[in-house]
Image (cartoon, coloured by chain):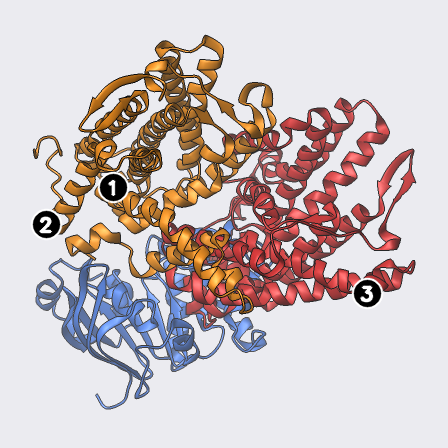
Amino acid sequence: MSDAILRLKGVKTDIAQYHILHGVDLDVPRGAVTMLLGRNGAGKTTTLRTIMGLWKPHQGEILLDGAPINGLNPAQIARRGIGFVPEDMGIFSDLTVEENIRLAALSGQPIPERLDWIFEAFPALRTFWKSAAGTLSGGQKQMLSVARAVVEDRELYLIDEPSKGLAPAIVATLAKALKDLKNRGASILMVEQNFSLAKALGDHVAVMDDGRIIWTGRMTELASDTGLQERLMGLKMETA
Amino acid sequence: MTDSAPTHAPTMTKLPLAERLRPWLPVLLVPVLIVIGYLIIPSQSSWLTLTVSGLAMGMMIFVIASGMTLVFGLMDVINFGHGAFISFGAFVGTTVLLALGQMTGAPSLLLNLLAIAGAVLAAMIVTGGMGWAFERAIVRPVYGSHLKQILVTMGGLIVAEQLIYVIWGGHEIVIARPETLKGAITFAGAALEKYRLVAVAVGLIVFLALRLVLRRTKLGLIVRAGVENPEMVQALGYNITRVFVGVFIAGSALAGLGGVMWALYQEVITAHMGNEIMILVFIVVIIGGLGSVEGCFIGALTVGLVQNYAAFMEPKLALISNIALMVAILMWRPMGMVPVVKAK
Amino acid sequence: MMRILSGDSPKSPVLAVLLALILLALAFAPFLFPGSRSLETAARICIFIVLVASYDLLLGYGGIVSFAHTMFFGMGAYGVAIATARMGTGYPALAVGALAGMVAAGLVALLIALLSLRVRAIFFAMITLAIASAVAVLVSQLSAITGGEDGMNIRIPRELTPAFRLGEVMGTGINGKILNYYLVFFCCLALFLLMLRIVNSPFGRVLQAIRENAFRAEAIGYRVVLYRALATCLSAMIAALAGSLFAIWLRYVGPATTLGMEIMMDILLIVVIGGMGTMYGAVVGTAIFVLAQNYLKTLMGGMSEATSALPLIPDLLSPDRWLLWLGILFILSVYFFPTGIVGRLRGTR
């Protein structure tokens, strides 16, 4: 793939004395959704956090739009144009919903057009605009976390398991918003355990195991081949 | 798809009244304490005098402690050397005031205030600069290790204190208040020292200004968010280290301001005055909830009042009474009165 | 031999030789270094080894910073002084005082530990600092009980004073002072070996596991708070016993000799320089520190005088500024020398 927005070359990350990533090679295509799949502990979250600079790779290279970003601090990486939705949502519970979003708008104030879109996708955020984010439900917090990442245009969005622990109705809301984001031409790298959601959103797939990428390809390829799914992820995937 | 969004209200509105009041209980502590003071202190005028004096002391401790609590909240850094900034502030401020003897001795409020402003400015610049150096040389290499932080900042405190001996000599220095701030005004039969009223006003201004910055500005937003989850603030594109250094410098400068205020309050300064005040500062940040400016404010006023009331009832018990207060509050709320939410 | 050391060998030939030298020097101090000043120094080293080692139990093995260690030290010292003042001179008073001081120290330590450690370990440092400072102020105020700033002289049994003469061995006159020294020496030796046993017991290993990773230790099922509280109590009680010995040896107790912040800093510095979490670090560190203190201060005085023509330098080199250099040394050793002398000798980093 020549037109990769993000390229990882032989990235190795250690956390404390443990080797977590053993050399990750991955191309994330521009203007598409790439799903990062794999069982628990395969290194998916570590990969996202390493890209974000929250953990430093001790070897390898990470290129955003051809320019190396490994070695930069997370703030610099964010300002290069990466929006991040962490696994634990990273909500500031002491701040109001508005303040959470305002903080994410690096240019100062959120753009009204974007806000309208966010409110349309997540009406609850408008309702609780002035409430402390800590008082939101789990699903609303996840919406806020996504809203924070998309409040401005980013080169790339890193989204870590947005459906985790959420009720189906809320997952549907999130799915619709993410689809909307995709239709706007965004580049997304997303970790997802819920295969039906991954299938619905993903264009490309990278499967990880034991700190390495073990398979890459198109989502249609993986979705149609249950044998492949079983082999790659060691689990029977629901194909609902 | 709007109907698929959950419509239930945030949990806050569902709580019974008692539950909703609970977070505000600490705020009531100060008025309750003042009422208790009124009941146990026989003379109404002494009560008023003591209350003003307690509030003045509390405000000064708050000015000193606020920076320290924020530094901890933001980067999990505990600075045992904070007391050095108090002492240095006091010595620099006093030196300037003594040099401006003409202005402080004149019976003109304007000239007096100008002299104080000059002293405060000099003290804050010096202690702010010290804070910058302290962060760079002493704190920066030991991020993430409380054990080393405590040891190293304690070492820094000793070095700073010894430098005071080298620069100013070991003797205590007497410093008189400026002419127009001497004496007291009489209100409702109680003598209220003018300077204490000024101290209360300055403390209140610092508190309100801090709140304004924290609540109304982007910088404040970053600091408040950083106290809860510094990593996420980074991931949103803000260099938390730079913000932290700024807060460290500001906190050190505020300690310097507190040092000048304290010098004029006691009218005498010693090289180890910072250490003595730090005992109260530690009690304040612990009972307030490490990392919380509001908790620090309430804690400081409480400690100031208890110290003054207790000193009136039984002078020897003043310090012990504050230890008892700390023990009682920690049993009531182990994380302090205004616990700080921490991600992780 | 290994049983006496609880299986904790020095693991370095140089260290083993150093330790043996220090042990021999202290054991035969009255005969090797006659004169009352050297005997003072030797007794001081013995007592500080125990005091520092008991602090190491807390800091090096438990990973907890306390600023109340001199308070516990003082409790033991004042225990002996007050008991003697109330009960009259005699061994029962010494025993009762030491015991009371130890129990009081243990109880106070338990209270502080339970109060602060259940929240965060760093609370402990701040709370102990606040309480220790308050107690120091209180001790100097309550002059009716403690003698205030002047402190208290202690009348100990005659057998332990220089006035009691026994005869001569190897050309050295044996008097009560030397008996007193051996009381101090053997008590300190026993206490040190006891601590060595404690840190090498299963309890000590759990403490170290907690220091490395409190969360994991809790997850495996150890009650972290309980273990830390227990370590605090043990450490406080041993410090109190060291305090009692110090009071008996000096026949005096006062705020400056037992409660001062300066002593607390000495303890911290010795632990860090000697090597945290090694026990032997306390021995080597104390010996070097006390000797250096005696001779370096003199050296600084000389240098200060020699440079008296220069500006500022004599002020910096004055023996009164001993703490300034100590503080700088302390910071540098935390950065560059975190495993201390023992760590270096053992080749660990």
Q: In whole angstroms, how far apart are the C-alphas of marks 1 and 3?
A: 57 Å
Q: In whole angstroms, how far apart are the C-alphas of marks 3 and 2?
A: 68 Å
To which residue does mark 1 refer?
C283
Visual hue assigned to chain C: orange
In front: B167, or C66?
Answer: B167
Q: Where residue C124 sits: x, y (%)? A: 43, 39
Visual hue assigned to chain A: blue
The residue sitting at the bottom extreme is: A2
Give left or right: position of C272 versus B63: left
Circle 3 crowding by C-alpha within 10 Å: few under 14, some 14–19, many from 20: some
Visual hue assigned to chain B: red
Residue drawn at x 48%, y 22% is C153
Q: Where residue C17 sits: x, y (%)? A: 13, 46
Asked if the residues shown at circle 1 and circle 2 are in contact, with their CB atoms under 8 angstroms apart, the answer is no
Among the 4 quarters of the image, the one containing residue A155: bottom left
To which residue does mark 3 refer?
B114
Give left or right: position of B238 versus C206: right
Say what secondary structure mark 2 lies in.
Answer: helix
Pick whichever of labels 1 and 2 is earlier in the sequence. 2
Q: Disc 2 residue type?
A: Pro
Residue C171 in sight in this render: yes
To which residue does mark 2 refer?
C13
Residue drawn at x 29%, y 70% is A56
Residue drawn at x 54%, y 22% is C146
Asked if the residues shown at circle 3 and circle 2 are in contact, with their CB atoms under 8 angstroms apart, the answer is no
Q: Is residue C124 above or below residue B158?
A: above
The lab-note entry on whether marks 1 and 3 share a chain reads no
Say what secondary structure mark 3 lies in.
Answer: helix
